[in-house]
Image: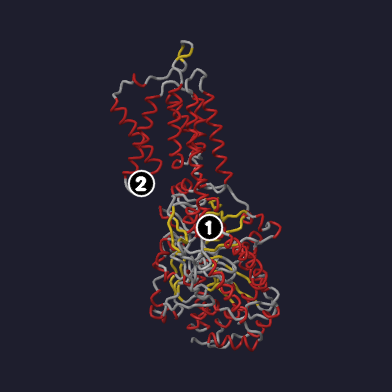
Amino acid sequence: MAWGTILATLFAILTLSNWDLRGSALSIVPAAALLVVYIALIPKTINGAHYLPLVNIEDDIFPLSLRVVVVLVFALGIETVAFGFSTSGIAPTFSLGLAKALSWYFTIRTTRYTSWCIATAMGTFSIMSTRDPFAQSSEVQAVSHVIVSFFVLGQVIHMLPRQAKARSTLWVFFLVSLVPYLANIFALRTAQSFTSQRFGHSQEHPVEALIHSARAEFESLLQKQSKNYTAAHDEYRRRYGVEPPLGFEAWYEFAASHQSPIIDDFDTIYHAISPFWKLSGDEVVEVMRHVQNAPNSELWLCAFDGDIAKAHCSHSHRTFDRNIGFLFNKLLGDLHGILPDVKFLVNHLDEPRVLIPPESFGGDHHGKGLFNLTNMSNRPVWDTITRFCASRRSGRGAWTKHTVQTFGLPFVTDPLATMDLCRHPEYSTTHGLVMSPTSFRLVEGLVPILSTGSPSTMGDILFPSPAYIESEFQYTDAHDIAWESKQNNLYWAGSTTGGFASDDQWRYYHRQRFVKLAQNVKRRQHYYLRERGGVVARVRSSFLNSRLFDVAFTRIFQCERKFCRDQRAFFNVKAWADKDRAFRSRLVFDIDGNGISGRYYKLLASKSAPLKQTIFREWHDERLIPWLHYIPVSQSMEELPELVFYLTSTETGQRMVREIAEQGRAWFPKAFREIDLSIYTYRLLLELARLQDRKRQAS
């Protein structure tokens, strides 16, 4: 009976915890203690008769030392099978196994009389009472665990015979869940009290300063756009030192007639196209043909017919192009007889494709139309995609650097610099794309390929993602709610895309790091800004207000079985979430997956304020102003606890984040209409047509 009760209790704990072996380890402690005390209170006899006879451990024929060794070996075996050897050595595994062995042996030695019917009740109590209230995303969740613990403990006490003495002593176990909850409440109130220790009138919070600078930058961007064709023509020549492509005047009239707020800022196209000018038009056409026919190139060749304004895309063995052809036909379908015929290669993979060697690394060799194609999927690519950093010239673009005092926290003051891989060697161990991409078929050479996103060191030509026009990613106002009705927290839910997990390095992928921080899994040290005595300083604290974060994985995949299992045990995984669930929160997070995030436009158009973390450049970067239309987040995310606290828990922060939500929402229907995607794509095809003009000589 003793063994049966113990095993039944363990089974109940594992079942209730969804067989989370790591998570249920802590729950075994109160269950074992409660079981020991419970059994100690059971009377040996009732009315002169044995109550529940059990196996008498003392009659065991084995000596004490042998029994301890057997139980210890058994515990260590279970520990090793379940968790493997600790990455920090065998000592942690041995100590944990020893602790379990001794606790099990103590329980068995002291177990005299008990009943199997308490197993599930004790399992429920142990699971609910050991849920960390600091990790709960709402007060309701934390309170519900305390209430359930109270009633289940009452059920356990009720199971004791009335003849048992001191039954009420079991109520002491209620402290297991009550004390952490009260400590959590105290910590929350202490954190709220810090709002009075914020910045005085003499100091601006970095977020406030960055927002003020962004407003001035946006006004400058709008004012400097050309007002007529002559000005647009002259600005093109001034920026790039060459004449605009054939058809530029018709493009200007098209953009102006549709009230495009952006006329001149298309540097993204120029910087992507200009490296290929060292090839002649004939060489461009030939290299496109060769790479498209290369084995395992995984590229689509699209031919756009200008007369009928229709694109036809083909692949060597695939039939579904992930709506690439649909995108070009939808965006350019009304431009009959306006655009020239043009062909272009398109990458349908999420990850980028092109690495362009500079001339000092054999540029002339690659200028002859030669290329290398290498499959680097599921292995580190950092050294490969950054090996030309020393010869790169860093271009700036539309963004300017804000001179803002950040007090040691990495608030993003220069988005271009933040996304520049050459300036951040630490990214080599903080992003899934460079650590273990799910697919990475690198094309090294001067090959013009269109992709939806690309890091700073790669040479993909950017075009709007087909995801942005698909119904799943469209914003619907009826599914949104007013700002006042939204929860005052940060929301994100998604899958473990971003890298393939074939070892323990998944802990350092970008999405896993974000969820680990938001769920405060390891109670790490966080940084906050406090003003004391007129001096602003960065302070460290292990506290994170989990009420301000509603973040979880809803699907664990792109991993080998063992590491999928490890991630399910490590994170608090939630059930599938509705695609519009984010609109219930005031702050919504957007983060890279395998490539760019397709949900970004929905968040920009919504009544919530988007926080964005990315290393991918996109076609729209020049028309979005950080700290005005969205809130950029660094790759380290060290500023995120302070950022979320400031935007949700201070009066100034709440006012400013609402303004960001409103400004992004107001800008979206002006600069991100379907016609704006058409205007960009129209201009891109003019540049591609000039690039592959067979009369054009290499320059």
Query: If you read the primary sequence from the N terminus, does the residue marked by circle 1 or circle 2 appear first?
Result: 2
Residue at the spot of label 2: 86
Q: Of all residues shown, which one is farthest toward the top?
A: 48
The quarter in which the N terminus is drawn is top left
Q: How many marks?
A: 2
Q: Nearer the viewer, mark 1 or mark 2?
A: 1
Residue 229 at what x, y percent from top left?
65, 87
Q: Nearer the viewer, residue 458 or 47?
A: 47
Q: Amino acid at mark 1?
A: Ser
Which quarter of the picture shows residue 253? Answer: bottom right
Disc 1 and disc 2: Cα gap in Å? 44 Å
Disc number for residue 196: 1
Q: Amino acid at mark 2?
A: Ser
SS category of the residue bearing label 2: loop
Q: Is residue 25 left or right of residue 579?
A: left
Relative to 527, is 100 above or below? above
Q: Nearer the viewer, residue 391 or 131?
A: 131
Q: Nearer the viewer, residue 89 or 82?
A: 89
SS category of the residue bearing label 1: helix
